[in-house]
Image (cartoon, rainbow, N blue to C red):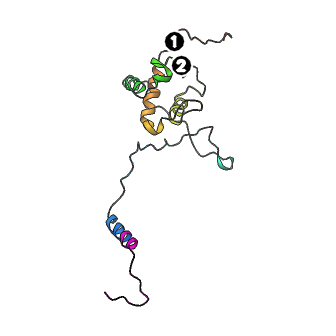
Amino acid sequence: MRQMRGVRAPSLLTWLLACLALASCGRHAAAPSPQAGAPPPAIRYEAHLAAGGIAPAGAAPSNPHQGDRAVANSGALLFTAMNCDGCHGGDGSGWVGPNLADGRWRYGGADAEVFNSIYYGRPKGMPAFGGALGAEGVWTLVTYIRSLPVPGDVPTESWVQP
């Protein structure tokens, strides 16, 4: 083959990149599913730092399954499957992790606050399950936890009477 003066032959890398570019033509990335692990919309979390001191818009989410007994039953299965009982004990009665049925909450016991604790995790032991379960799975757990009966006697009762 005869080579022209001043013109270089394309390198192997150039040919490889050209082939890859042509091969990818017409392919489109699959659209992510709504449960693809994206954080739920409109959640304000007090521990996040806001740039310039201005917090982004947010609201407290509400439990779409509040009081649904069938979802609470599914949540009981999920509670065991995700090994929540390994820290929080059977039926959320407490063990290494706190009791989830006694109505006392370090980070707040409203549905949205319990959701945040499960979804984002908490310091000193509570992992974030939002990436593994998505918002729907976390709401299922919240529904189960809120369905737990409050025990008649709590072993760490306060000496101060209300």
Taking the image as drawn, is residue 53 in sight?
yes
Alpha carbon distance from label 1 to label 2 = 10 Å
Q: Residue at x 55, y 27 (%)?
A: 110
Say which residue label 2 marks: 99
Q: Quadrant of residue 69?
A: top left
Q: Nearer the viewer, residue 111 or 38?
A: 38
Label 1's element?
A: loop
The kind of residue on which mark 2 rests is: Asn
Query: In x, y percent, where is residue 135?
Result: 45, 37
The kind of residue on which mark 1 rests is: Pro
Q: Could you tell me which quadrant the C terminus lies in? A: top right
Q: Does residue 157 lie above or below 66 as drawn?
A: above
- Left or right of 4, for residue 156: right
Q: Label for residue 22? A: none
Q: Nearer the viewer, residue 90 or 39?
A: 90
Query: In x, y percent, where is residue 86?
Result: 47, 23
Q: Could you tell me which quadrant the N terminus lies in? A: bottom left
Residue range of the region highlighted in magenta in the rendering:
1-16
Say which residue label 1 marks: 151
